[in-house]
Amino acid sequence: MVRKARHNSQAISPTLIAFGNQVRYYRERMKLSQDRLGERFPVSGSYIGQIEVGKTRCTEEFAQQLDELVGADGCLARLWKDLVQDAAYPTWFDWPAIERDAAMLQAFELSVVHGLLQTPEYAMALLGDEAAVEARMGRQSILSQESPQPPNLAVLLDESVLYREVGGSEVMRRQLEHLIASIGKRLTVQIVPSEVHDGLSGSFILATLWDRSEVAYVETALRGMTMASAGDMAKLSESLVSLRASAFSMKDSVRLMRKAIEERWT
C-alpha cells in the first residue's frame, strides 16, 4: 500500500518554529505589525506571518534584510544558518499555500509541462509515486476553486517540451491535447522558440498576491527555492517580459502543439 504524502499545516519543522519565534520577538520589539514589516521589503504581511509560525523558510538574503530592518544585530542572520538552512523541509515547502492564494501566476518551464497543467499519466512518468502524483493533482484544484477566485495563469513553455518524450507517445499526445483544451480566458499557454533566451538558466514561477506583493519559486540544479526580495522580483519580471516578447502568439502556439501531436506523437 502506498502511503499518502503529508502536505498539511501540521507538518512543521521545530527549527522553523524556533526561528519564527525570534522573528516575532524582534518585530514586536520594534512595535511593527506583520503588514508594516512586510511593507519594508515589500512582501505581504501574511508571508511574514508564515515565517513566524514556521510554515515557510525564507532565503538567507531575506533573513539578512530582516535582521537589518528589525535591528537584530546579526542574530537572525546567524540563526538562519543554525535553524533554517538545514531544516527538515525544503525551501519550496510553502509554495502550495502561496500558489493557492495568488491572484496571478506567471511561469516559464524549460524542460517539462508546468505542474498545474500536467495530466496524471504525465505526472506519474515524471514522479513515479502515487502519493506525489495525488498531491500534484490536488494542487490543480486552485484552477477551479471558488474562494479565493482562481488565479490567472500564464505559462511559457520552451519548444523542446513538446518533443521531449515523457511516458511514451500516448501520454505525450494526451498531455498536449490537455494543454490545448485548458487554454481559456484565465489561462494562457505560449511556446518559446528553443534558442538562446533568458530562461536557459532554469524554470521559475512568479506569483502576484491579491495585495500586489510578489513571491517567486525558482528551480536550480540542486533545489528549488522561494524568494521575495525586490531585486529578485525585478530580475524575474524582466526575464518574463523578454521571454514573452520572443514567444509565439497563442494561435501559433496551438498550431505548434497540434503539429507536434500529428508529426511526433500520433
Image: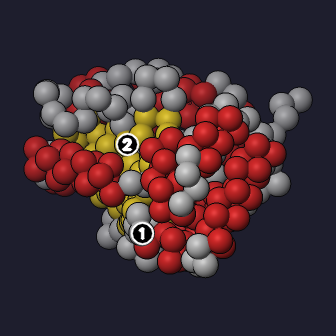
CB contact under 8 Å: marks 1 and 2: no
Q: Nearer the viewer, residue 121 or 228?
A: 228
Amino acid type assigned to the residue bearing label 1 in the image: Arg
Q: Give x and y (percent) for residue 1.
A: 89, 29
Q: Nearer the viewer, residue 168 or 236?
A: 236
Q: Secondary structure at mark 1?
A: loop
Which mark lies nearer to you, 1 or 2?
1
Dot 2 crowding, Cα within 10 Å, few <14, some 14–19, many 20+: many
Q: Which residue is mark 2?
A: 204
Q: Which residue is mark 1?
A: 40
Write the residue at 51% across / 41% down: 60
Q: Give x and y (percent) for residue 211.
A: 43, 77
Q: Give x and y (percent) for residue 86.
A: 67, 31
User: Compared with residue 20, is residue 171 higher up or lower down, i.e. above or below?
Assistant: above
Along the horizontal axis of the image, is 17 left or right of 60?
Answer: right
How many numbered badges does the structure rendering display? 2
Write the residue at 66% across / 73% down: 28
